[in-house]
Image: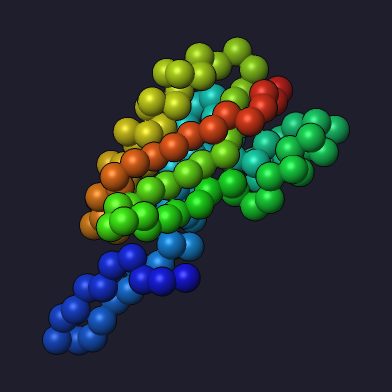
Amino acid sequence: MAELKRISSELGDIYISERAIAQLCAKVISEQEGLRTPRQARESSGFLGTLTQAVKGDGIEVLKEKGRLVVKMTLFAVYGTRIQEAAQKAIREVKARVRELAGLDIDDVVIEITGIVKE
């Protein structure tokens, strides 16, 4: 994975990778009401967990496309959640937290709701 950001000081260089950003995004999603990463959905949905195995890992991909930082997330919604509202809130939170903690501005967040799980 290529570096996303290099921060230099007299003490040395710091590199922030796509994997670190993806893990940060997964943590933000875990704090959101009504949305689950595939890993969270597998852990909480019992026998329905087998349905979530089509998406590996956390379902989060961080890409640099033409100088733009794009986060693509494949998520599950909890039954009864207002999906559009939950997704918009998640997008705002992901952008804000990555900016706050990593100093990076995300240009685009794409959320694909791939299924519904029970709480």
Q: Residue furthest right?
A: 47
Q: Establish if 93 lies above or below 62.
A: above
Q: Residue furthest front?
A: 66
What residue lies at 30% left-to-right and 47% top-to-bottom? Answer: 106
Q: Is residue 14 visible?
A: yes
- Residue 69 is situated, as x and y percent measured from the top left of the image, at 33, 52
Q: Quadrant of residue 11?
A: bottom left
69 or 104: nearer the viewer: 69
What residue lies at 62% left-to-right and 23% top-to-bottom? Answer: 78
**Type of colouring:** rainbow
Q: Establish if 116 lies above or below 42.
A: above
- Image quadrant holding the C terminus, namely top right
Q: Residue furthest bottom?
A: 11
Q: Is residue 101 visible?
A: no
- Residue 23 is situated, as x and y percent measured from the top left of the image, at 48, 55
What residue lies at 28% left-to-right and 57% top-to-bottom? Answer: 67
What residue lies at 57% left-to-right and 29% top-to-bottom? Answer: 113
Q: Quadrant of residue 96?
A: top left
Q: Is residue 46 left or right of residue 37?
A: right
Q: Is residue 54 left or right of residue 7?
A: right
- Residue 103 is situated, as x and y percent measured from the top left of the image, at 23, 57
Q: Establish if 76 lies above or below 99.
A: above
Q: How many marks?
A: 0
- Residue 94 is situated, as x and y percent measured from the top left of the image, at 37, 41
Q: Is residue 117 left or right of residue 26?
A: right
